Amino acid sequence: MAVEFLAKEMETAVRVVHLASSLCVKVQDKLRLPSSTNGGHVKSKDDDSPVTVADWGVQAIVSWVLAQVFGGQNLSIVAEEDTESLSKAESLGLLGAVSSAVNEALSEASKYGLPKSDKPLGTADILEAIGRCNSVGGPKGRHWVLDPVDGTLGFVRGDQYAVALALIENGKVLLGVLGCPNYPVKKEGLSNGCNQPGAKGCVMYAKRGSGQAWMQPLIPGGYPESATLLKVSSVDDPVLATVCEPVERANSNHLFTAGLADSMGVRKKPMRVYSMVKYAAIACGDAEVFMKFAQSSYKEKIWDHAAGVVIVEEAGGVVTDAGGRNLDFSKGVYLEGLDRGIIACSGQVLHDKLIGAVYASWESSSL
Ligand SMILES: Nc1ncnc2c1ncn2[C@@H]1O[C@H](COP(=O)(O)OS(=O)(=O)O)[C@@H](OP(=O)(O)O)[C@H]1O
Ligand SMILES: [Mg+2]
Ligand SMILES: [Mg+2]
Ligand SMILES: [Mg+2]
C-alpha cells in the first residue's frame, strides 16, 4: 500500500502542536497568579517585545520531538527564539522554569502518541533543542518553520495567541498547523466527548494541494480521535463581511485599513485579534478578510504567516500581498519583496474588491 505523501510529517506536526498547546495553557494559567510567583515568566527582548517561558518551552519541545522522529542530523528548523538571554548566568531561574514546563509536558508525550524521554531533559538538552532552530531557510530543501508563541502580547494579556508550525520544501509551504488554545470552538467542531458548553481551544491543519483543512478540539491531557473539515465563509458581499486585523497599531496601520474597508463597502467594525488566530478565523468562516499593513521599514517573517497561509488556502481562501502576488517563502527568514501588506480573504470576489481598493487608495494618495 502506498504511504500517503507527508503522512508522518503531518501527523507528527499536529500531535506536537497539541502537546505544545497544553504547555502554553499551563504557563498562561500561571501568569494569572499574583506577580510575586510569576515574575520570572515574562522577559523583554531587545526590540521591547515580550518573550516567556512558553515561547522557549514550545520551541524546545517541538525541536526535541522533531529530532526524535526525523533525526537531528539533517533537520532544519527556522524559528523565532534563540538561547542568548536564556544562557546567561543570571537567567538560571528562568531556564529552570523553562525546563520544568518542558519536562512536565514531555511526561505526557505518550498520551499524544509522541516519543517521550527516558529521563527528564537537562538544561543543556533544553538549550541544545532551542539552539538547533537556527536555520535561515532558503530556496532549496526542507525547512520546518516555527513560531512557538505567535502573539506573545496576547498570551501575556490572557488573550488570543497561536502555536504555528509549517513545513517548507523548495520555497513552498507544504503543510501548516496552528494551535489556538483560546479560540472558541463552534458546536459542530466539538466531538470526542468534548462538547461542554463554552469549550475553547483547537488545532487547525492543512496539507498543500489537498483541498482540505481540518480542525480538532484541544482536549486536556490527550489527543482527540477525530477532526472536522473547515470551510471559509461563503459571504462575498462586503456589507456582510467581517474584517480582522492586528490589535496593536504599531503592527498595522489601522487608519489605512479602515479607509480600505470603507471604500470596498465594509460596514462592520473590525475584529482586532492577536496572532495568527486571524488566519484561523478566516479558515473557519468566522471572518472574511484579514489585512496587515506594517510600517514600510518592517520586514515580515516567514514564521508569522507560513502555517496560516496554507490553512486558509486549503480551506478555500485567497492570500496575497497588497499587489495580488503570492507570498514568497523561498528567500530565507523574511518575506522578501512583499508589496506593502498582507491580504487574506475568504474568496476571490472580496479579494478582487480589496486589491482594487488598495490600488485606488494608492493612486489617490500619490496624486
Ligand atoms: N513593528 C512591527 N510591525 C509589524 N509586525 C510586528 C512588529 N513587531 C513585531 N511584529 C510581529 O507581529 C506579530 C504579532 O502580529 P499580530 O498580527 O498578532 O499583531 S498584534 O499583536 O495583534 O498587534 C509578532 O509575533 P510574535 O513575536 O510571535 O508575537 C511579531 O512577529
Ligand atoms: Mg509571531
Ligand atoms: Mg512568537
Ligand atoms: Mg515574539
Image (cartoon, grey):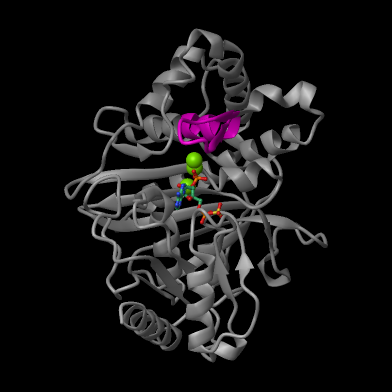
Seen in the image, is 273 located left or right of residue 3? right
Vertical comparison of 194 with 47: above or below = below
Q: Position of residue 264 (x, y in %)?
A: 48, 87
In the rendered image, residue 58 lying in the magenta stretch gets the answer yes
Seen in the image, is 177 located left or right of residue 335? right
Task: State the residue at coordinates (80%, 31%).
Answer: 33
| Residue ranking furthest to the left | 140
Vertical comparison of 280 with 285: above or below = above
Q: Where is residue 153 in the image (x, y as percent from the top left)?
A: 60, 44
Q: Is residue 231 visible?
A: no
In the rendered image, residue 137 lying in the magenta stretch gets the answer no
Nearer to the camera, 4 or 362? 362
Vertical comparison of 67 with 189: above or below = above
Q: Where is residue 45 in the image (x, y as percent from the top left)?
A: 49, 31
Quadrant of the image containing the C terminus: bottom left
Q: Where is residue 2 in the image (x, y as percent from the top left)?
A: 29, 58
Q: Can residue 11 be seen in this view?
A: yes
Task: State the residue at coordinates (43%, 76%).
Answer: 317
Nearer to the camera, 120 or 312? 312
Nearer to the camera, 304 or 47? 47
Vertical comparison of 73 with 326: above or below = above
Seen in the image, is 251 located left or right of residue 335? right
Seen in the image, is 308 located left or right of residue 284? left
Q: In the rendered image, which quarter is residue 366 located in? A: bottom left
Quadrant of the image containing the N terminus: bottom left
Q: In the rendered image, which quarter is residue 112 located in? A: top right
Q: What stretch is highlighted in magenta?
A: 43-61
Q: In the rendered image, which quarter is residue 57 located in? A: top right
Task: State the residue at coordinates (60%, 15%).
Answer: 96
Q: How many marks?
A: 0
| Residue ranking furthest to the front | 367
